[in-house]
Image (cartoon, rainbow, N blue to C red):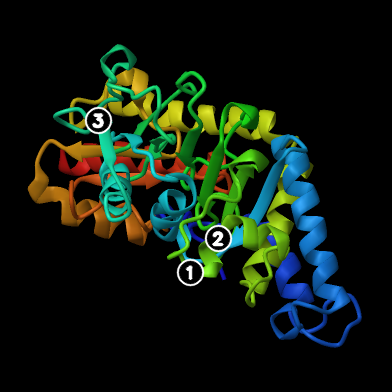
Amino acid sequence: MTRVFNFSAGPATLPVPVLEQVRDELLDWHGTGMSVMEMSHRDKPFMSIAAEAEADLREVLGVPANYKMLFMQGGATAQFAAVPLNLLNGKAADYIVNGAWGAKAVKECAKYGKANTAAKPDKFNHVPARDGWKLDPNAAYVHYTPNETIEGVEFQTVPDVGSVPLVADFSSSFLSRPLDVSKFGLIYAGAQKNAGPAGITFVIVREDLLGTCNPVAPSIFDYKSVSENESMLNTPATFAWYVSGLVFKWIKSEGGLAAIGERNHRKSSLLYDYIDSEPFYANPVAKADRSWMNVVWTLADANLDADFLKGAAKAGLPGLKGHRAVGGMRASIYNAMPEAGCAVLVDYMKEFVRTQG
């Protein structure tokens, strides 16, 4: 079997060493005679897996001691509701909307209280300028989406919002480079981009923000309750938790987030440099706000899109079709995508121009 270079936006490619270890341990985890998928989440073997994964994630990300780490379910979409249910506490919240996922988050918040769209550009092709944000100094929190997977727009720095807690949906850029967690009140991220398989969601929340959950919220959405029960208020996504733990160890073996970040920057730069040099392709995002994770582009002739995708799949480059909302192409180059994959993609793009451009 020959593995392809999978450019899917998620679920996405996983590190080969992780997949190999999962394969080797699938039927018998460390002499227990059973798969992790078969273990009780309350027995010692899985409890050790869970504790080690949390410790490794804390180490990799440098999570301060006054933050709780929750392993939840429902993806980032569930957190669109869980965040306001836990944090609004009778106040309004500010939302910075720079893409489709941010728009979904503010819409969900509005079901539970006042959601103020503090910034939103006319087109989702850049990050809204900070001096134009209309922030409420008394807001319960400020929410933003650091990386928008559909439009390929990314914040390159963490915005300063003063003393108001900063909340971020890091799903598609989680663990892609170093991050100062202390600048945030809460971070959440689905695993299926950079950190593991679909099914588990990471929530990192400052302790002082716990304990004000709306009483109408389901108990599985109450951060304080989930924390007090060590993310086992109900049966967690045990297999996804286990695989994510292996990904954290892989990140450590690769040199940590500093090395991962440098590699991700090289990968995105390789693609952007070629796209900018070839008139047949175009990227619509402002150069200062281009995503490291999701590189989008269009062809000069959209009638050639189907041929481009067909040829790419034949060349072992699946997953390049852009989101249906924007069309074009999208290469999702998360942590596990090797630099060689981006180089092969550029070679294919060059050949397509030569034969079809």
* Residue plotted at (39% across, 53% down): 80
Amino acid type at circle 2 is Asp
For the residues labelled 1 and 2, the Cα–Cα distance comes to 7 Å
Q: Which mark is residue 222?
A: 2
* Residue plotted at (25% across, 34% down): 117
Residue at which label 1 appears = 218
Where does residue 48 sit, x and y in percent of width and height? Answer: 85, 66
Horizontal relation, residue 306 to residue 45: left or right: left
Where does residue 27 sit, x and y in percent of width and height? Answer: 77, 84
Nearest to the observer: residue 157 or residue 353? 157
Amino acid type at circle 1 is Pro
Q: Secondary structure at mark 3?
A: loop
Q: Quadrant of the N terminus?
A: bottom right
Q: Is residue 147 visible?
A: yes
Eye-nearest disc, 3 or 1: 1
* Residue plotted at (39% across, 35% down): 144
Nearest to the observer: residue 123 or residue 3? 123
- Give residue 268's quadrant in the image: top left
